[in-house]
Image: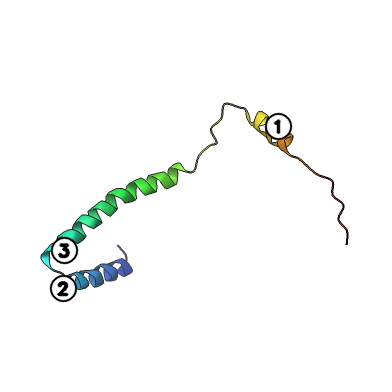
Amino acid sequence: MTVTDKNILETYSNLFEGLSFSNKIELIERLTKSLKSNKSKENNFYKSFGAFVSEKSAEEIVAEIKSSRSFRDKEIKF
């Protein structure tokens, strides 16, 4: 833990001292929930980096992209 992290935790700890018991329990529940959901968000983030899934070969995909291109002849006048 870095010095900055320790200072942040100390500051939050001092802030939470003024909370009532029920508010502290609510805060603990929310922090716990955020930790559980944070893992799934992190996993989803890393799962988004991956290979393109297709039954086609790379050459077939490239050929399909190139064949779907359309160009139009338009004269640009200045």
Q: Secondary structure at mark 3?
A: helix
Q: Residue at x 38, y 44 (%)?
A: 43
Q: Position of residue 64 (x, y in %)?
A: 68, 32
Q: Are marks 2 and 3 in contact (CB under 8 Å)?
A: no
**Residue at numbered disc 3:** 24
When asked about the image quadrant of residue 4, the answer is: bottom left
Taking the spot 21% from the left edge, 72% from the top edge, the residue there is 15
* Vertical comparison of 19 with 52: above or below: below
Horizontal and vertical percent for residue 68?
A: 71, 36
Q: Are marks 1 and 2 in contact (CB under 8 Å)?
A: no
| 64 sits to left or right of 4 | right
Alpha-carbon span between mark 3 and mark 1: 61 Å
Q: Of the residues under marks 2 and 3, which one precedes in the sequence?
A: 2
Task: Report the residue that reaches farthest toward the left.
Answer: 21
Q: Point out the tag, 3 or 1, that comes first from the N-terminus.
A: 3
The kind of residue tagged 3 is Lys
Residue nearest the observer in this picture, 70 or 42: 70
The residue identified by callout 2 is: 18
The 10 Å Cα crowd at callout 3, few under 14, some 14 to 19, many 20 or more, is some
Label 2 to label 3: alpha-carbon separation: 9 Å
Q: Check disc 2 and give the amino acid type.
A: Gly
Q: Which mark is residue 63?
A: 1
Q: Is residue 59 left or right of residue 37?
A: right
Q: Secondary structure at mark 2?
A: loop
Image: 6 above or below 33: below
User: Which numbered disc flags the more N-terminal residue, 1 or 2?
Assistant: 2
